[in-house]
């Protein structure tokens, strides 16, 4: 059985597809859970926003005009959305909202399975272990909750890249000290790909991974400060900046020049300790996954790593006691326990946030249990090491079957609970969405009160203005003004908006009441005015550099691979 898996590529592809289908079981019901899902509405609006602007000819999308019934929201500047162009394109060709989103979930799950398999197959040099690791990671309880209960699109998309970052670090630190510049570049490109995936999906996951990588580098300081590793990190830094400049430049520009709500949370000692895990929750495998359901008696989500993952910890500790665990297994086990402690309510999050700047920065993660995503990838690695040390073929087959059966039972139970408690909705068009479903409104300009929106143009002076055309962020107005006048549009004033008259003259914009776009006409004017969201030239230059950088990195890696094959 194991020999067939290792030798037959078709079997491996079929098994990867089966793992994906099992992990996507809740998708195959009509509609989608639309009440208790924490972030679903927010992310569906993001997809709609991208689709709306793409149809208007705006690329890349920065400002999304659909939010807040037309007041606009720059979510694409603050929140990496590269992968969301996939469901947005599906929306453009006429596929309904829910189906487009479900297609995205399936594709991300399949990609997660594929990337996980490739990485762990390379680490262990065995396809059977790679597949077992893929099953463990892809159907882990925490990931299922992220996908179907929390609808945490950014986080579960970022989890697709965790194994890639792990594999890149494995290659970097397992490589010989005298590896050549070519291998250093390849290793750097792998790490760049993983980090870029995080940048363009979920910045909080990037923060978590970045912190763990820094600690890892410090612990392995002797290896870190070797020439080959340092050169690899230099390559990684340059590649990452160049490839992601298209996102970094607008993000930094807005961070420096726009006062938005998320900036106000930094320095305010965010208190998150009560959101951490209690020890018993790690072992609550069959507790209802939803939170705050009437009559359920529980207000906390199910965010355990899952049965298989927790059994791996038990097995690793048992092997350690029996003297059968090697150094790497011991370090991984200790790392997992430490991270589980960090994810818990017992870690002094509130004290650190209140007394140190570093603690306040770390507390921006919002929920301590976000670290469980990293725990799962480390437990998957640990599980692979355990499989690797099983020398008897029969025992290994039994172990694989046990993992498969437990995983299948977990998914069946999860799907049953999902269907039982879900309030299924069939979102079809933008009209079915609440454009004010914005979470914590992190990217709304400070002191902008949504309750004060009037959804109408307000004027001062003898002026008549009407909206005659709207195409995404582009608006055309007919104006007739007698003498000086002031006009306030029902659009939040963010950096980038410009207004021009028919002659192409720019009309200065300033903040009006609750930060709405306001401008003055100094003299009589009859004609049209054009509102546009204009991306600065340095944003466009950054995009061009990123495109060129991506092509260069890809071409260099292809050349290195071809030369490597020729040398063999």
Image (cartoon, grey):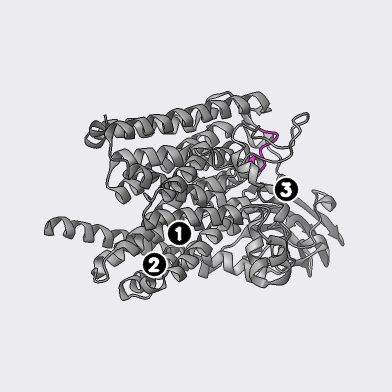
Earlier-in-chain disc, 1 versus 2:
1
Residue 482, image x, y percentages: 83, 62
Is 61 placed left or right of 160 in the picture?
A: right
Residue at x 44%, y 39% (from the top left corner): 136
Question: Is residue 480 or residue 194 the one in the foreground?
Answer: 194
Instruction: Give the residue number, with chain letter if any, for mark 2.
Output: 236
Is 403 placed left or right of 390 in the picture?
A: right
In what quadrant of the picture does the C terminus appear? Answer: bottom left
Task: Give the CA separation, mark 3 to mark 2.
Answer: 39 Å
Secondary structure mostly seen in magenta is loop
Considering every residue shown, the one lying at the far left of the view is 567
Q: What span is in magenta?
A: 34-40
Q: Vertically, is 432 above or below 505?
A: above
Q: Nearer the viewer, mark 3 or mark 2?
A: 2
Task: Check if residue 35 falls in the magenta segment.
Answer: yes
Residue at x 28%, y 43% (from the top left corner): 126
């Amino acid at each position: 059985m194991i020999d067939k898996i290792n030798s037959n590529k078709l079997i491996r592809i079929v098994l990867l597809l089966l793992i994906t289908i099992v992990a996507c079981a809740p998708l195959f019901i009509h509609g989608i859970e639309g009440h208790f899902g924490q972030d679903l509405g927010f992310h569906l609006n993001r997809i709609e926003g991208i689709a709306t602007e793409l149809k208007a000819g705006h690329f890349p999308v920065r400002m999304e005009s659909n939010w807040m019934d037309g007041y606009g929201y720059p979510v694409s500047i603050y929140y990496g959305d590269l992968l969301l162009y996939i469901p947005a394109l599906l929306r453009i060709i006429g596929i309904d909202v829910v189906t487009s989103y479900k297609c995205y979930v399936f594709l991300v799950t399949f990609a997660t399975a594929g990337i996980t398999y490739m990485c762990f197959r390379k680490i262990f040099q065995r396809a059977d272990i790679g597949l077992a690791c893929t099953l463990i990671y892809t159907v882990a309880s925490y990931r299922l909750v992220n996908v179907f209960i929390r609808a945490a699109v950014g986080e579960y998309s970022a989890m697709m890249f965790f194994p890639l970052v792990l594999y890149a670090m494995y290659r970097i630190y397992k490589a010989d000290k005298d590896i050549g510049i070519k291998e250093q570049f390849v290793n750097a490109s792998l790490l760049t790909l993983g980090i870029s995936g995080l940048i363009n999906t979920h910045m909080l996951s990037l923060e978590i991974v970045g912190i763990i990588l820094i600690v890892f580098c410090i612990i392995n300081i002797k290896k870190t400060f070797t020439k080959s590793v340092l050169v690899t990190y230099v390559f990684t830094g340059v590649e990452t900046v160049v490839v992601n400049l298209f996102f970094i430049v607008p993000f930094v520009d807005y961070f420096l020049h726009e006062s938005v709500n998320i900036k106000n949370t930094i320095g305010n000692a965010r208190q998150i300790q009560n959101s951490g895990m209690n020890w018993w929750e790690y072992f609550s495998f069959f507790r209802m996954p939803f939170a705050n359901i009437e009559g359920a008696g529980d207000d906390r989500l199910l965010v355990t790593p899952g049965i298989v993952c927790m059994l791996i910890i038990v097995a690793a500790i048992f092997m350690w006691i029996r003297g059968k665990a090697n150094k790497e297994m011991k370090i991984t086990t200790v790392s997992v326990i430490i991270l589980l402690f960090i994810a818990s309510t017992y870690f002094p999050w509130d004290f650190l946030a209140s007394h140190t700047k570093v603690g306040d920065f770390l507390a921006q993660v919002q929920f301590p249990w976000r670290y469980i995503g990293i725990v799962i990838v480390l437990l998957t690695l640990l599980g692979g090491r355990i499989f690797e040390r099983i020398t008897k073929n029969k025992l290994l087959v039994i172990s694989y079957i046990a993992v498969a059966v437990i995983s299948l039972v977990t998914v069946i139970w999860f799907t049953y609970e999902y269907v039982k408690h879900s309030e299924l909705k069939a979102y079809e068009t933008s009209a079915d969405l609440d454009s004010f479903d914005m979470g914590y409104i992190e990217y709304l300009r400070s002191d902008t009160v949504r309750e004060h929106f009037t959804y109408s143009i307000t004027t001062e002076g003898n002026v008549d203005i009407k909206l005659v055309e709207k195409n995404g962020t582009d608006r055309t107005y007919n104006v007739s003004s007698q003498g000086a006048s002031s006009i306030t549009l029902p659009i939040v004033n963010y950096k980038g908006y410009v207004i021009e008259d028919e002659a192409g003259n720019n009309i200065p914009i300033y903040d009006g009441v609750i930060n709405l776009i306001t401008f003055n006409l100094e003299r009589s004017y009859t004609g049209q005015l054009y509102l546009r969201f204009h991306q600065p030239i340095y944003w466009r230059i950054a995009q061009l550099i990123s495109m060129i950088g991506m092509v260069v990195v890809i071409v260099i890696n292809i050349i290195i691979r071809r030369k490597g094959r020729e040398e063999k």
